[in-house]
Amino acid sequence: MRFRRLINASVLAVVAVGSLSTVAASAHDARPPKPQEQTLRSLAARHGLSFGTAVDPAAYAADPAYKTMVDSQFSTVTAENAMKWESLEPTRGTYDWAAADALIDAAVRNRQLVRGHVLSWHSQLPAWVTAGIDDGSIDGPKLRALLKRHITDVVTHFRGRIWQWDVVNEAVSDPWETPSAIHLGGNAGSFKQKFADLLGPGYIADAFRTARAADPKALLFYNDYNIEAFGDGGPGDKTQFVYDLVKRLRAEGVPVDGVGSQGHLATQYGNYDVFQVADALRRFTDLGLAVALTEVDARSLTKNADDPAVAANGADLNARDQAAAYNYHVLLQACLLNRHCLSFTVWGFTDRYSWIPNWFKNPPEGSGCLWDAAYQPKKSLRTVQGDLAAAGPPLVQTRLPQVPRR
Ligand code: XIL
């Protein structure tokens, strides 16, 4: 008996020591995980900011590491290609919703919001639309009717499940195109110009009105690249042109709720600074619009800058790595500084599946994502994590929710 009591006492002592060390351990655990061990979505949630990625359904199905990261790191997803017209209606009159629906179902499971991308765009149209435009069988009135039906069908199908729609994408020319004065369309004689001419200038307002009628609750965005900062305000300033366009649309009562700045940056060009981008976002939000960074990546030349046949040296690659991180930093900080900047979406998060090497081949470019091709963190990731962790009131405040404009 006495012996047994002793045992009990020693068991109790062990338990007591155990629970003491449990207390010590849990006091330690009560400290938040290091920022670099937290998910981007939880770091961004401190600011009410949604942190998103474009998703490639093939990689999502085939690569468990990719799926795990999409599911855990992000609070918003965008279909990289699965909601484009060519994907949804490859054959005239026959819709294929499977890939896009699966993406949305996964988003619901993961409590993620969805950016719908994209309704009106001259690129990645079904072959039957492109061929019809080229051979003249689809004239202006026919194209307008087709686009209206497309927008109605797609927005109706996804009604209630899309947070922000990119209603019109890349409708505006670039300053290096001919004529160089910015306009709706692209290079003289290009397909992009033909598409704009056939539709006529009123098509943008119509696209927004059609989308609003099909889903009154989704936020409707105009989305474009190279509008991160204003230039000289002259006829070659694309940001100014887009600003004037959305300002006019708002004044006419067209239901435009936001401007998406894609944010495809490249380290071989001059960088913006945080305040140039913050100023551009502020000018858009002063119009009553929301803004979002919708397709961020920061690519670099992968070879010697003077001779693409020669490998880049380590010093150059280092500098590019750091410049890419700075580009992410500029866009993210500018977004954080604006309470109407609702989401920050990267166009893919790993170099393993990035669109960049397939698209920018001459000279070869790559390395634009937060994680490398082996899912190892890059300087860009650490910079983004640090920015999200270090920001807060009074200069960085939580986002203000946006209500669709009637
Ligand atoms: C890109 C995709 O990432 C590629 O897979 C596809 O081959 C071409 O389109 N601006 C946009 C996006 O609005 O839809 C584009 O996505 C990248 C540029």
Image (tube, helix red, strand yellow):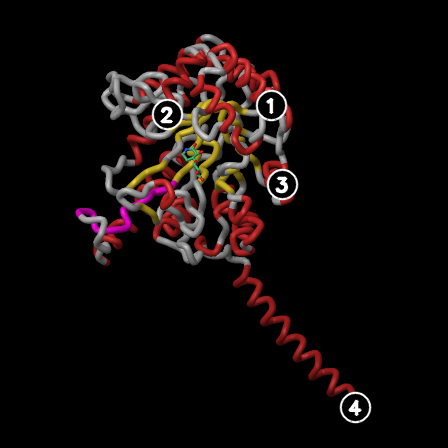
- The residue labelled by disc 2 is 282
Left-right relation of 159 to 392: right
Q: Which residue is mark 4?
A: 2
Measure how far apart labels 3 and 1 are at the Cα level.
Answer: 22 Å
Asked whether, in this view, residue 94 is left or right of residue 31, the answer is right
- Residue that badge 3 annotates: 102
Image: magenta residue range: 297-306
As measured in the structure, the alpha-carbon distance from the residue carrying label 2 to the one carrying label 4 is 79 Å
Give residue 372's position: percent from left, percent from top.
39, 54
Q: Looking at the image, tell me whether mark 3 or mark 2 is earlier in sequence order.
A: 3
The mark lying in front, picked from 1 and 4, is: 1
**Residue nearer the viewer, 119 or 332:** 119
How many angstroms separate mark 3 from mark 2 (CA)? Answer: 36 Å
Image quadrant in which the N terminus is located: bottom right
In this view, which residue lies farthest toward the right? 1
Q: Earlier in the sequence, mark 3 or mark 1?
A: 3
Name the mark nearer the viewer: 2 or 4: 2
Mark 4 residue type: Arg
Q: Quadrant of ligand 1?
A: top left
Quarter of the rendering containing residue 134 = top left
